[in-house]
Image (cartoon, helix red, strand yellow):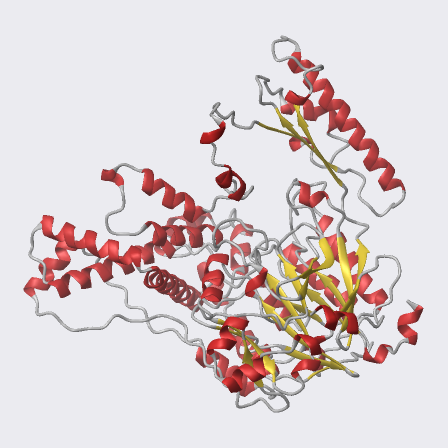
Amino acid sequence: MSRINSGGEEDTFKILVATDIHLGYLEKDPVRGNDTFVTFDEILRHAQQKEVDFILLGGDLFHENKPSRKTLHTCVELLRKYCMGDHPVQFEILSDQSVNFGFSKFPWVNYQDGNLNISIPVFSIHGNHDDPTGADALCALDILSSAGLLNHFGRSSSVEKIDISPILLHKGSTKIALYGLGSIPDERLYRMFVNKQVTMLRPKEDEDNWFNLFVIHQNRSKHGATNYIPEQFLDDFIDLVIWGHEHECKIAPTRNEQQLFYVSQPGSSVVTSLSPGEAIKKHIGLLHIKGKKMNMEKIPLETVRSFYIEDIVLADHPDIFNPDNPKVTQAVQVFCMEKVETLLDNAERERLGNPRQPEKPLIRLRVDYSGGFEPFSIHRFSQRFMERTANPKDIIHFFRHREQKEKNEDEINFEKLTRRPASEGTTLRVEDLVKQYFQTAEQKVQLSLLTERGMGEAVQEFVDKEEKDAIEELVKFQLEKTQRFLKERHTDAEEAKIDEEVRKFRETRKENIEEEEEEVREAMTRARAHRSHEAALASGSSDDDLMDIGMSEQKNNDDSDAGTSASFSRGRGRGRGQARGGRGQISTSRGASRRGRGNTSQEQSNSSRSYKPVSTPTKNMSIIDAFKSARQQPSRNSSAKNYSEDIIDDDSDVEEVSFTAASKVTQRLSSTSTSSKRSSQSQITRGVDFESDEDEFDPFKSTAASRRKQR
């Protein structure tokens, strides 16, 4: 590291890179409950000791979309402990921060806030575990951002077009364009890339001298036809991609020979699944950038609980196990016990060199018992290792491969066998299960009005995001749309004809995928607005959730309230909550005062995310009732209401640097000559230099000439 200091540190960015920390994972487990917090403490300690310029997180800082109070409190405590202080920040931001942090109430980087004293800024995108949800589209990262502890960037609420505007960082002679894109459903983002609806903006001035760093949180490995993002979709002017979401640690950057950029996959800092990818040693990265040169130094995490996994195929040991032997099950159990003991010995030897590592390791034996064998009792087996392992209940995992029928070699289609992904069929989502159920159901119980895709999306929102009104609003919305369709068609009041028209209308909606997705988004918006309306009514007569605590404390003393609780919508304790409501009003008015800087951009952000009012019918009519009412009353020509979000992009405030859209080679061929001239970048002038050495660090070895020859 001495050579770094002598090589001109004033021109070198030092960035600590980590992804998928999953704070709060198994926090109620008595053994593993604090693992995520201890490791996060180690990550921040490394950042402080290395005196990094900033920390870059690639999503999934939290494991739950709504983290517990303990998890949120511990995160705030650690960020305040390590990231606040008097150490000066050595770099500056040149881009328009009202664009980079437009979703925040404080649209500027936290270390430039006069009320805060930040020594290590933290920049983070959101992942699929901590993505924005609800009527206000908020997530736990927004709480940390409002508290001034973290800079949340890479948000995009538009489902039609994504413009990724970089944060332009400057330190000495080194300039970094930091791009970020928070987690988006893979199928949707895949389709947007195919339709050329994703654009990465580039600075016009000295565009070849910027080091382009992109942070993304999506599936990298293929889980289906469109359930991943191929690296070839990303623009070729990028120099380095930090890829989150994948938990296997592949932090040493690998080069994509087609796009000519490097990809680093730091992986998770905690074991969340007992799979082979999680057993690889966990690392974080110390990224050095100077000019167009970079180097990634691997830093092993010492506080991660050790994890050992081994596969056993009983059929591969015919000399030991005979399925016809009546005592073969006992022999298999003894064999597995010996394997576990060996893994425990290996874990103990590893821990002796590092006292900071947790004592009890994670052990997993995957036993393939196909071939006529029988599994033994897992519970009885786990009793022997209760005090020695962190996961005694799931040490053994029995599985059995399906035995294929004997076929002639000519009948086997090897092409299908090789093309099928290994994970296909093992990863099922809620919407896939809904679709499979209705497709295989009997004709009389299949959906006749709704579509499987729309219902699956609504169920997914209900399960993952706790949108309680999602299914109801989707049913209402599609029912209203079908009623309008029947009115416009002037269908005769015969049940057979109505059923036929409904069936045709449903088939046309299934064919138009984009229109169906718009229906789902509109229904979800109505559900959120409906929930916000109920919340507003509830907040008008009660202070906050704190009154529920008073209700539970005084339950034994207020038995007289039991008779009158039915008349209130929120139960006992409501009257007491009204008496204390002044406090909440004062805090609201106090929070209304805002910093003078950035108020204009804040108002624009608020005005751009507006919802049209939702009209809820007082009575849900059936199809025939709707037809009859249309016959009795003159039809009115009323257009359907739209509840989609409108995003207003205003680049008039950009002062220092302006942007031009940069796209892939295929996009540049179809664009005008002027824009293609700005977007394209000569492979000869890029000169990105990367050296990876785990032990020795020499980031600025001159190999640019050789890179140019290769490209």
Indicate the position of residue 613 as horizontal and vertical percent values. 33, 72
Q: Residue at x 54, y 44 (%)?
A: 421
Q: Nearer the viewer, residue 138 or 128?
A: 128
Q: State the image quarter where residue 376 is shown.
A: top right
Indicate the position of residue 294 as horizontal and vertical percent values. 77, 69
Q: Residue at x 68, y 41 (%)?
A: 276
Q: Quick check: 272 above or below 93?
A: above
Q: How many marks?
A: 0
Q: Residue at x 19, y 64 (%)?
A: 484
Q: Nearer the viewer, residue 5 or 200?
A: 200
Along the horizontal axis of the image, is 410 left or right of 94? left
Q: Quick check: 2 above or below 336?
A: below
Q: Nearer the viewer, residue 563 or 533?
A: 533
Q: Quadrant of the N terminus?
A: bottom right
Indicate the position of residue 77 as horizontal and vertical percent values. 73, 62
Indicate the position of residue 297 as horizontal and vertical percent values. 81, 61
Q: Would residue 61 be seen by someone viewing this image from the given angle?
A: yes
